[in-house]
Image (tube, coloured by chain):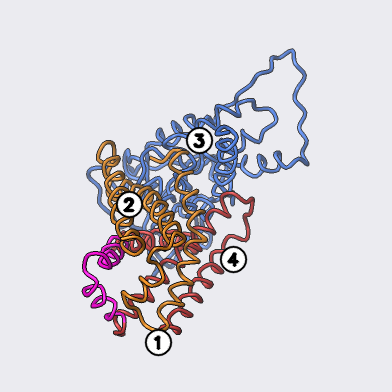
Amino acid sequence: MKSFNQARNRAHPLWLAYILHRVSGLALAVFLPLHFWVLAMAMTNPDKLNGFLSLTDSVLVKIAEFVLVFLLAVHMFGGLRLMAMEWLPWSSSQKTLAAASAAVSFLIAVLFFLQAL
Amino acid sequence: MIGIRLYMAQRITALLMAPLVLGHLALMIYAVQDGLSAEEILSRTQGSVVWFLFYGTFVVAVSIHAAIGIRTVLHEWLGLKGLWLITATLVIGLLLFLLGARAVWAVTFS
Amino acid sequence: MPTDVIQVEIQRGTEKDSHVESFEVPAYENQTVLDLVSWVQQNTDPTLSYRFACRVGMCGSCGMMVNGVPRWTCRTHISKVLVNNTVLISPLRNLPIIKDLVVDMDPFFDKWVAAEGVHHGELTRHDPIASIDETSQARKEANAGIECINCSVCYSACDTVKGNDDYLGPAALQRAWTLLNDAKDEGREVILDAVSGRGGCHNCHSMGSCTSYCPNELDPMSAIAGLKRETTKRFFKRSH
């Protein structure tokens, strides 16, 4: 607990952007094999695929989808922010950019969620 | 841990994927409007060279990108190094590529 | 006479065998974290080991973790860091502990050299002194980083250093960047090679803790971004 509190004391906006990028990347990497496996059922077992796809009507799966889309958007915008920062000689606007990228990705995710409902 | 070659590979695949991700997101928003079904997906992708290239490129890029990313996390958070780290990177990249390639083939030309 | 006391918790011992000891230190109007540590050493426990020299933020030897945040203790007023009248002081992170608050700075300085943070001269004493254009962009980049006092606060703040033994760290890479931009330094290729290796600038994740916690308000993260930019340019030039 003590070391957790100390680590928390060190946290700041850019650090949170870093941890969000890492966690979203890891989560996407874990999801991908599953995603691929289900899609390949189009070839191996179309009925089972339809079974899976009908699951997407449930609210729980909708929320999971929303989270995945959010992770994808956040990882992409976070990554673009990173590359802009590394390759374009910007400096002071980094935090604004980090916030903006998070906002845009959230917007896209919300849009998706609304469409899906 | 990461030299300039792995760094460039990860950044180039990232840049390559940026428009693909946007396309993928847009397609998702469009496709889920009337609900998803195997027939609906296949009617769009079956026999399409464009979708094969789109998702084929995506799969190749993401396999490289994710393998390098996970490699970094395995080293920094779990202390994996040397031969173990190289093996893990290759296995993860290869696994993602094979599963992804199989999925792309399934919805386009199978 | 001071009317109040401050609870000071100090991490004692070595790398393998450490524990936290509590001390009560009289509170004064103007008191730095270093003052507290010195009071304990002079009045309660003379065996407490710690480092300091100048006490005015010039020498970079009094860096410690204060409530988990790396700081220069001689310029950190206690009122800014007290939580419930208590403060936890421990040795700098990411460096081997020698005893109590004293860490072994060797890895930090070894990496400074490994990043080619040394002068690369070509001229002799018979050549005229290279002229410096203070208004040039390169000079501005160099000037931005030269006030580093080697305190290792950025090195202790960095989580990439924590997880990656090879990583050269913010201070060493920032020095490489200042030398790369220095008209008097001739080591461009050697520096770019040194920062492109397995411990080089490409390991940085731009989490920015170095820049957040640098006591001199320098910006190592942007310096490292500069190195990434230059090495990327060179990568594409070489590949065709």
Labelled pair 3, 4 in contact (Cβ < 8 Å): no
Q: Find numbered disc 1 in the image and state the secondary structure of the residue it sits on.
A: loop
> Which chain is drawn using red?
A
Report in which chain the residue with disc 4 lies: A
Please say if A19 is above or below C146: below
Residue at screen point 53% across, 50% down: C214
Labelled pair 2, 3 in contact (Cβ < 8 Å): no
Indicate yes or no whether the magenta region holds residue A99. Answer: no
Residue at screen point 38% across, 64% down: C86
Query: Mark 1 to mark 2: distance in Å?
Result: 33 Å
Secondary structure character of the magenta stretch overall: helix
Residue on which the image places disc 3: C195
Span colored in magenta? A32-56
Report in which chain the residue with disc 3 lies: C
Residue B43, image x, y percentages: 38, 72
Residue on which the image places disc 1: A117
